Amino acid sequence: MARRSHSGTDAYEQLRLLQSIIDALSAHVAVLDDQGRIILVNEAWRRFADRNGMTWDNGGVGTNYLETCKNASGPHSEEAADVLEAIRSILSGKTTTYHKEYPCHSPEEKRWFQVRLTSFEDGSGKKVVVAHETITEVKKAAEEVRASEERFRAIFTSAQDLIALKDCNLRYTLVNPAFEKLIGLPAQDIVGKKAHEIYGTAAGDHIEELDKRVLQGQTVEEEFERPVHGVLMTFHDTRVPLRNLEGQTIGVCVVSKDVTDRRRLAHKPYERLSDNYYSQAMREAFSKARRAAATDGTILLLGESGCGKDYLARWIHEHSRRSSRPFFAVNCAAISRELAESELFGHEPGAFTGARTRKRGLFELAEGGTLLLNEIGELPLSLQSKLLTFLDSKSFLRVGGDKHIRIDSRIIAATHRNLETEIAQGRFMEALFYRLNVFMIRVPPLRERMADLPILVAQILDNLAVELQLEATPSIDSLSLQQLQNYHWPGNVRELKNVLERSLILSDGGPLRFDIPHNHIARGTSASSSFVPGRKLEQILNDVTMSVISEALRRTGDNTREAALMLGISRDSIYRYLKRLGMQPPKRPRVH
């Protein structure tokens, strides 16, 4: 009798222990005996039963769960029958576990549950644990993931842009149909390969260099030419890191937009940058520019406003190894001091009021290409310091950011100011001046290169004819050209273009006439306008000679015989001068 009492105490303690365990579970749990009767339920089961009008409590222990399942009716009878069969199978020893998901239509909403059955044995026989658990949120999340995958698949397959995914070894893992179509290979022949196996060694090495930066967490954008079936095509690429749920970078996603046609339109034939000038000053500038284009060093362009510093900067870019990549120019005097740092270096979301999204600055947009910082002397001292840091490290922080961004872009700085004077007056950093002044090119004002004026007039009129959609290039008579040559041009080439455009608009199809202030007409010959203190006599004489021969050739329609007669020299002398000065007959506007 004492032993039975002790045994009853042990069983009671076991039930208490089991009760405390199942009460800690969020699932609705009941324990059945080997006859299918409920011997224990947890608190979650009781709450669920109460909400659904049932009475599962300790006073109801002994209720036969098999009969409950058997008598179940309504839309869930199939699930109840399956559970009934599973319990019988477990009790008979045919199986040990069961799992099924099923919908439960409550008055409020459709919810999803899963039921799990497991068994164990104690001293009183086999027991079955029934656990019902709400999985509505899991189902919703899975449905959202499925819908998201379907949206991604639809975008991925229908996108006109090229989309590719790569792993950490920079091998392609997935490409979309647009990628397959352009490359001319099926996906199975692309997946597993690296960029150099698709585009060749040179382009592949460049792509891999960018991808490695993305693996370090950067987002990289650039325009880049690469060969496809032997034809150079231009793509605007956006590269972003692929990350797993833990935020670790596991690969690279690349979206490439074919901008070949846009780039061709942006570089029309009439905008071809010429270096065919007669003046000694301009020939010296272009001689230096050729050497600069062959390197990647920082360049400083000095010259008056409107003299063509931006033109020379673009010429250097177009003749450098970066010519297939973007060229950006910014006038530092034209952007507000408050926004200058954001415009140049970009910002992170929340960096300041109104900064809702991430913005890439001009330094990033010029990735792989060239950035012209015009009027560098107007840059605030705080940004001069940040620019100096970038030139030293080739990296920078976005406004509000804490991650250094490394880029590969060439910097060309330009100014009309005397930077040494600016340094003395505390407005420009001496260290930045020395860092920029790696290779300095002086761009001469128009008054020092008047021999080039007929060429400039022809170029500008050709460009204006295309811009204004004229049927033919406008003509200019000899007297009008002489009027332009006698003008001092304080506004340089920019002023010349404005005068020509205004005259063209006002001409109404007739001869061009120029409204030039008389108080600015230069006195004397072009020799006086060519005189600048510090220039050698030989350079001045060469400019005068070029100017005289150019004018003689212009007036005679490039007829060397008539030009020689006009100048009182032999025709052979004309050719000797042309050869010695490196001159070629220029393209002239039609003279009538």
Image (cartoon, rainbow, N blue to C red):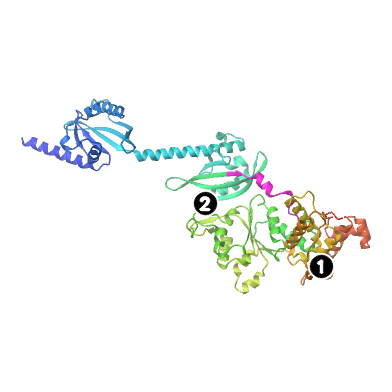
For numbered disc 2, what is the local secondary structure?
loop
The residue located at (41%, 38%) in the rendering is 143
Work out whether residue 362 or residue 569 is closer to the camera in this orientation and state it.
Answer: 362
Spot the residue most to the left: 1
Residue 324: x and y, percent? 66, 49
On screen, residue 139 versus residue 271, left or right, reads left
Q: Mark 2 or mark 1: which comes first in sequence?
A: 2
Which mark, by number, is residue 540?
1
Give the residue number, with chain letter if any, for mark 2.
218
Residue 205: x and y, percent? 60, 46
On screen, residue 215 versus residue 573, left or right, reads left
Tell me the crowding category of disc 1: few under 14, some 14 to 19, or many 20 or more residues within 10 angstroms, Cα based. many
* Residue 414 lies in quadrant: bottom right
- Inspect the image, locate mark 2, and give the three-letter code of the amino acid beneath it: Gln
Which image quarter is the N terminus in?
A: top left
Residue 114: x and y, percent? 31, 35
On screen, residue 44 versus residue 433, left or right, reads left
Indicate whether 287 appears above or below 158. below
The boundaries of the magenta stretch are 256-274
